Image (cartoon, coloured by chain):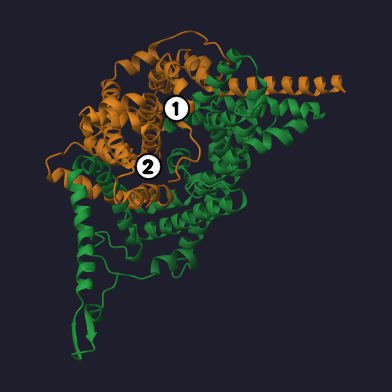
Chain colours: A orange, B green
Amino acid sequence: MKRKLEITELIFKIISYTLLTIFALCCLYPFIYAISAAVSNREAVEYSKIILPPIGLQFEAFSEMFNNNMFWNSYANTLFLTLYGTIWSMLSSILGAYALSKKRLLFRKFFNFFLVFTMWFSAGIVPQYLNYIATGKVFAGMGITDDKWLVVIAMGMQAMNIILLRNAFEGVPSEIEEAAIVDGATETQVLTKVYIPMSKSTIATVSLFFAISRWNGYFWARQMISNSNEHPLQVFLRLRLDQYTDPEFLAGWNKVYAPDSVIYALIVCSIIPILIIYPFIQKYFAKGVNVGGVKE
Amino acid sequence: MKVKAADYLLYDQASKTYRVDPEQAVRDDVEKHHWLHVGRTILKDWRLYLMLVPMILIFLFWRYFPMYELLGCFKVDDTVKTVNEQFFAGFSNFRLLLFGGNNPNMSQEFWRAMRNTFLLSFYGLCFGFPMPIILALFFNEVKSNIARSVLQVMTYLPKFMSTVVMTSLVIMLVKQGSSIGVGNMGILSQGLSAIGLVSKNAAQAGLLNNPAFFRTIYQVSGIWETAGYDSIVFFAAIIAISPTSYEAAQIDGANKWAQMRYVVLPSILSTIVIMLITRIGSLLTIGYEKVILLYNTDTYMTADVVSTFSYRYGMAQGGKVGLASAAEMMNNLVGMLLVIGANTIARKAANTSLY
């Protein structure tokens, strides 16, 4: 009896380890392949000789990217969108979530419903597009002609993130707030000195979600930003991909590296910042995945 | 509260006349006072209400106003006029989409998009949904903390890459071979054709140019992207199970499978139900970004979903805003009914609900 138990457990363990390792390697492989292909020579890439290590090192594909002003432009634009977008989203989310977390707020149920309804029903992309164009005109009338600001202000707000923050604020014991009020703290001081320090990890998680979704944003940036000098990195990458797989463009290709290497180099450049901060932020991930917290 | 004129009047028996009821006036005053009270509370607490303002404005302008624009689905498509100026057309856009009318191709295309939307989500539910649960069960078997962390970090990573990076990698990995030479097809196509999963000709022509492969590519890349990250929530539920439950089951002679069946599964059931509700709720909101980035004219047959359908008619080719809105209206209404339905069923059956 005892022995049989151990055997089923052992088999299950072996299966788990093997399949997990295979899956994890499959997850990672395309990125490693991209790095190898970006620095391999033309023949190796064009005849798909690369399996894992690069063949015939070259760095011209990277330097072609680095010598392209548009590339640095798009990098700066992405940084702009990520920085200001995250600040704006966090500011409005924290303030709103703090107010929603207060039991004394009148019409609290209504405001909560106001948020949650947007998770049930969305207007869809065409009405959203028309709306962005209309608000873009309003912005232009107010003197904000830079499309980037419209993307920063109008996009990337998520009801789920506000609910995460609201739940974190609700978890702060009310005695601490009362003590602060007795000591003469104003509403703003209660928020900045009590609530924000006490829910630091949720705030870090939510800022991370906002920052990553801003960094990765593509569709609306491409639709709304008309000037190609203002395109963020993701749009730049996609446009280059279209260009470098176009047979007409490739007809006269006579460089020492394959056109694919340029695309891979660009992919590597766009994921490097995420790869660098990834080890530091990954401990926060589990925090963000809360279950059943939407209910009021 | 509805106030009738008669409420203010009392019949006086002695003088046989009506007089004003003084108590009603007091009740009235309280009623008025209620709103005064609301006003006073807001004024006294104005900082708190001011904090709500940016959030409310953002949601109003960029979430609720588009819902107003969605009413364009009842208007005739006229490119030069705005929603307000257009002619009210009743349900003609809906009729055109559902039954064809004078343009049967349009309704065929819409139904194709509807079917693709449903099938892509349904396959996602069948193959994409169980994957994170299986991964979490496997992670639970890895007792070494370091090994588990390394494996988890590796599987979470794709979730944080943008859709553009992911789709670019997919496009490059399965791209078509060039007519010159043997090589130049994507490394993945090459591997798949070498082990005989796809024919050499199909791999040479590019898997993304073949409608037969689109759904598979969509699902497999979806699992690659999200399965690892989605397993976090199930794994958290599994490690919350007390070790004594396993011990009790072991004493009763339960082997590994019996433990899975009678200890682990019941403990994570509520998590599974809630994740399932979320999944069903988003059944019809297929990520348009990924489809737009992956599909091409050759694969509309299996790849075109409702949001890309309306994207093409409403934005890319322009013009048919009313038609595009009508398509999205139907899609989103059905989607909302699905969320509410799934939530109600879960509340009744499993006593867990998300909303």
Q: Quick one: A97 or A259, which is closer to the camera?
A: A97
Q: Secondary structure at mark 1?
A: loop
A78 is higher (above) or lower (below) than B44: above
Disc 2: CA contacts within 10 A as few (<14), some (14-19) or many (>=20): many
List x then y, in percent, for residue A67.
Answer: 29, 16
Q: Secondary structure at mark 2?
A: helix
Q: Amino acid at mark 1?
A: Met
Q: Residue furthest bottom?
A: B16
Disc 1: CA contacts within 10 A as few (<14), some (14-19) or many (>=20): some
List x then y, in percent, for residue A20.
Answer: 64, 22
Q: Is residue A153 left or right of residue A42?
A: left
Taking the spot 48% from the left edge, 53% from the top edge, the residue there is B335
- Quadrant of the image occupied by residue B54: top left
- What chain does mark 1 sit on? B
Q: Is residue B208 left or right of residue A261?
A: right
Taking the spot 39% from the left edge, 30% from the top edge, the residue there is A209
List x then y, in percent, for residue A114.
Answer: 34, 50
Disc 1 marks which residue?
B161
| Numbered-mark total | 2
B346 is higher (above) or lower (below) than B322: above
- What chain does mark 2 sit on? A
